[in-house]
């Protein structure tokens, strides 16, 4: 018997896309949000899409009232999927609730500070209770885990360094929530993995280019889940770098802005100003997120490259998938259904390979059109 899947933040932009996928897939999710009217309306709208008489239901909870979250879960088989950000502000109550129940948790955070907290601080307690925590299971940073694992699986020589890049092709219109999150991320501390150690560094400290369909795209350094998960797969890897190319040709300017922002994060209004800068860099934003036909114009490209200690490239894996929002929703839906079936192989704070194994995750990604390409 499968556990129940609770989708926290179901009425937000990413939440709605995820709710539809879970419903169509027969998962009968419990749609959770702050407004009873909104979640009940969403459940009603999605009910006709549910197969086999398994419509979604609804519940009310608020991240700022942790007791409302604790009233949702009942046992270890339950799965809480969270799309409620910024996670550094709203994410902890959900994680702590899941740990207390020894249940499963999945989110789509891209925030380094929250990822570090889940892996460094929450992971040990999760191991004691049997909880399974999978942060960053959207576009950021699940596909990079797959690309890096495929690279490691194929190379005869274990690389000294792995670089992972997240890029987009076509017009990318982020939601206003995404813009705010990116702006906030440039203000918060980040980290890297160098010489076999996790080290603190500002976001956007480094910029490098990746080849995408014959053109070079710039990307900013950031702390992802790969800095924790790749060394678990291959301890001989001593450097893991993650880069995000949301800002495209503005990446170097955004890196410079990050220097200023990191030195002035306590100044009132800096966060709002960074959001304005990021909105311009990302080409504007939609208050409600891009419509489905707009999303289809964009594709996600994820690259993992391995290098020896001399800096010689040993190999590259390139993945191509749907736009960032549909890919994130599909990854959340797939991982939630796997966890509900107790298909995971470990407990604690996990990446997708550690949780499900390479073959299972590769199969799941192929099913949602995240596939390897040659370039």
Image (spheres, rainbow, N blue to C red):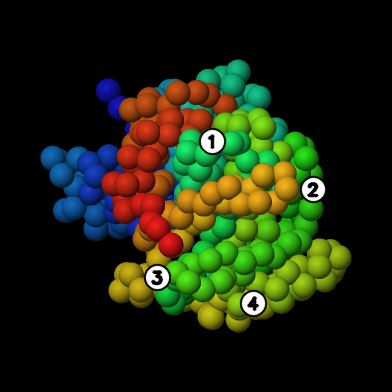
For the residues labelled 2 and 4, the Cα–Cα distance comes to 24 Å
Residue 17 x, y percent position in the rendering: 35, 57
* Quadrant of the rendered image containing residue 239: top right
Mark nearer the viewer, 1 or 3: 1
For the residues labelled 1 and 3, the Cα–Cα distance comes to 35 Å
Q: Name the residue under label 2.
A: 200
Residue 179 x, y percent position in the rendering: 58, 69
Say few, some or many: other residues with alpha carbon within 10 Å of mark 4 (under 14 / 14 to 19 / 20 or more).
Answer: some
Q: Name the residue under label 3.
A: 298
Farthest residue to the top: give it.
128
Q: Is mark 2 on a helix, strand or loop?
A: strand
Q: Nearer the viewer, residue 351 or 135?
A: 351
- Mark nearer the N terminus (2 vs 4): 2
Q: Is mark 1 on a helix, strand or loop?
A: loop
Q: Name the residue under label 4.
A: 250
Say few, some or many: other residues with alpha carbon within 10 Å of mark 2 (under 14 / 14 to 19 / 20 or more).
Answer: few
- Mark nearer the N terminus (1 vs 2): 1
Identified at 73% across, 52% down, the residue is 190
Residue 191 x, y percent position in the rendering: 74, 49
Q: Mark 1 points at which residue?
A: 156
Identified at 60% across, 81% down, the residue is 280
Asked if marks 1 and 4 touch (Cβ < 8 Å), the reply is no
Mark nearer the viewer, 1 or 4: 1
The N terminus is located in which quarter?
top left
For the residues labelled 1 and 4, the Cα–Cα distance comes to 37 Å
């Amino acid at each position: 018997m499968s556990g129940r899947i609770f989708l926290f933040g179901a009425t937000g932009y990413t939440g709605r896309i995820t709710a539809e996928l879970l419903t169509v897939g027969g998962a009968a999710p419990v749609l959770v949000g702050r407004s009873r009217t909104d979640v009940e309306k969403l459940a009603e709208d999605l009910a006709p899409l549910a197969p086999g008489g398994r419509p979604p239901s609804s519940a009310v909870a608020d991240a700022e009232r942790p007791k409302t979250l604790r009233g949702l879960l009942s046992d270890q088989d339950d799965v809480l999927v969270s799309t409620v950000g910024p996670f550094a502000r709203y994410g902890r109550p959900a994680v702590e609730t899941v740990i207390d129940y020894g249940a499963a948790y999945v989110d789509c955070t891209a925030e380094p500070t929250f990822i570090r907290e889940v892996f460094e601080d929450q992971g040990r307690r999760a191991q004691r209770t049997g909880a399974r925590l999978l942060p960053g299971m959207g576009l950021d940073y699940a596909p990079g885990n797959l690309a890096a694992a495929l690279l490691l699986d194929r190379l005869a020589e274990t690389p000294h360094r792995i670089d992972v890049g997240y890029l987009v092709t076509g017009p990318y219109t982020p939601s206003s929530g995404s813009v705010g999150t990116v702006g906030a991320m440039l203000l918060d501390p980040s980290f890297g993995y160098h010489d076999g150690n996790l080290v603190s560094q500002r976001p956007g400290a480094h910029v490098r280019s990746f080849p995408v369909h014959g053109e070079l795209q710039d990307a900013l350094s950031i702390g992802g889940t790969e800095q924790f998960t790749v060394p678990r797969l291959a301890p001989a890897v001593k450097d893991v770098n993650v880069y995000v190319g949301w800002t495209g040709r503005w990446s170097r300017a955004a890196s410079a802005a990050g220097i200023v922002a990191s030195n002035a994060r306590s100044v009132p209004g800096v966060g709002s100003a960074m959001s304005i800068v990021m909105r311009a860099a990302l080409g504007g934003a939609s208050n409600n997120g891009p419509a489905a036909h707009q999303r289809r114009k964009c594709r996600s490209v994820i690259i993992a490259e391995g290098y020896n200690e001399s800096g010689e490239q040993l190999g590259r894996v390139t993945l191509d998938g749907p736009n960032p929002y549909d890919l994130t929703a599909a990854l959340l839906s797939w991982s939630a259904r796997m966890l509900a079936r107790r298909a995971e192989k470990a407990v604690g704070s996990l990446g997708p390979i550690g949780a499900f194994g390479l073959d299972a995750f590769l199969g799941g990604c192929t099913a949602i059109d995240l596939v390897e390409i040659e370039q």
